[in-house]
Amino acid sequence: MKFYNLKDGTQLVDFQTAVRTGLGRDQGLFFPKKIQPLDNIEELLELSVHERNFQLLKPFVASNLNDQQLADIIEKTFAFPAKLVGINKSDEADTEYCLELFHGPTLAFKDFGANFMANCLSSFDLDAESASKKITILTATSGDTGAAVAEAFYGLDNIQVVILFPKGKISDLQQKMFTTLGGNIHTLAVEGSFDDCQQLVKQSFDHPELVEAIGLNSANSINISRLLAQVCYYFDGFSQLPKSKRDQVVIAIPSGNFGNLCAAIIARTLGLPIKRFVAATNVNDTVPRYLQTGDWAPKATIATISNAMDVSKPNNWPRIEYLMESGQFPASDLSGVAVDEIKTAETLKEIYAQGYLSEPHAAVAYCGLKQTLSEDETGIFLGTAHPAKFQETVEEILDMDISLPPELAQCITKQDLSKFIDADFSQLESFLYQL
Ligand SMILES: *Cc1c(COP(=O)(O)O)cnc(C)c1O
């Protein structure tokens, strides 16, 4: 399958180029022109996770990866489960489920996409010239991408990783998970917001000399490989639903950069029978407002307790809009809900009262789900991070202690190796050239 540049339809690349370059000309996103619906969904849902993911991903990657390579990548990437958990007290009455995506090494859903991307990059058969070229992965993080990318790329040959994060705006734990590794993982604390960090990444792609000199790439969800890996867990979650509950499925997705929602819509376009989606945001509500008014009017980013969603200019929106405009996904099957801080905290308490411990991002999604779910529907909300990753916030809201998993406990004592820069491209540029 080929991938088009959504800003310049004449640029048409194969999977490998899309993954190795990240962004197309004019900062355009790569995307398939037409997603071919599958006609064997029932069968796919019966397969094992690895077999199913192989079938799902093969059409997208087959021009560059042979069956054995893809099978190996899948085995390495999907080495941890996505678990569908009923959150209502009695099993009988379950109508609401959390799709837990946080059982990977850095305890957030981004482990799926980051691992898939890293495994693809290390599997491509390259000619001598491409193989000798270095790759610099430049990535902005609103909290969780940093850890997932650092973990997935740490120690890989020929790849330098530079992670930008908004100084003082992510939790200590989130920060320590990627700033203490060293080696090929470089971290920069930026005086600014996540949108500023994202802007710096995009600006870097605007400098062809820089791009060429350092082999610039991005591991943000602008990289199509990340989204493709995420498509798989929607099928996985769906297959874990009792058959009697598969008719009227609504999925609520806690959204920031809108990669996860985009992957969900790709899954539906492939034929997964999801009835409709709820895009749930915190008060950074550019998309819910846009869906209501038709006006794209990003405001300044506001810091919230669901900080991985503190994004007001979501990068993946053009892909979702493309799926709507090209008639592959009806806009009427998507609604937006914005959830403020008070409601987020209340919802976290409400879920806990049902016996389920969650965290602020999932609470935003659950709140969005509750507002629209009717009695005959089955609701799934995504658990995008492990509650312990947001320990302080969760402890404060629920007034209880929660313990840290060992992955987190061990990194908290290590030294933060980040350097500081202003939200200023020339400072970033000098840093990149001296790597
Ligand atoms: C990244 C992240 C999100 C937002 O996902 P997008 O794909 O950027 O919309 C939500 N929750 C958590 C915990 C995250 O890390």
Image (cartoon, helix red, strand yellow):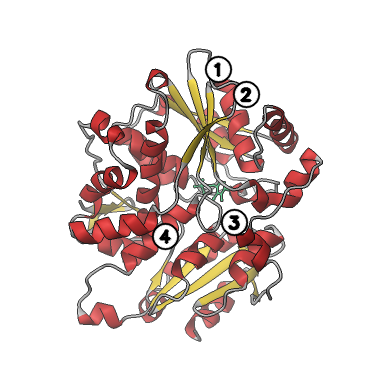
Q: Which residue is disc 3 drawn over?
A: 142
Image quadrant where residue 240 sits: top left
- Please report whichever mark, 1 or 4, sits nearer to the chain's N-terminal start: 1
Q: Is residue 363 left or right of residue 19?
A: right
The percent coordinates of residue 316 (x first, y second) are 44, 48
Picture coordinates of residue 430, whole percent (x, y): 54, 82
Instruction: Report the residue that reaches farthest toward the top.
Output: 375
Give left or right: position of 149 versus 231.
right
Residue pictured at 67% horizontal, 27% vertical: 354
Which residue corresponds to the image point at 57% horizontal and 67% vertical from the top-left?
164
Assess mark 3: CB under 8 A from ligand 1? yes
In space, the residues marked 1 and 3 are separated at their CA atoms by 36 Å
- Residue type for callout 3: Ser
Q: Earlier in the sequence, mark 1 or mark 3?
A: 1
Q: Residues within 10 Å of mark 1 (few under 14, many from 20)?
A: few
| Residue nearest the observer in this picture, 290 or 121 | 121
Disc nearer the start of the sequence (2/4): 2
Mark 1 or 3, closer to the camera:
1
Determine whether 410 is above or below 304 in the image. Answer: below
What residue sits right under mark 2 in the picture? 89
Type of amino acid at the residue the image marks with label 2: Lys
Res 27 visible: no
**What residue is pinned by disc 1?**
93
| Quadrant of residue 182 within the rendered picture | bottom right
Real-space CA distance between mark 1 and mark 4, rounded to the nearest whole angstrom? 36 Å
| Mark 4, residue position | 115
Residues at marks 2 and 4 touching, judged by CB atoms closer than 8 Å:
no
Mark nearer the viewer, 3 or 2: 2
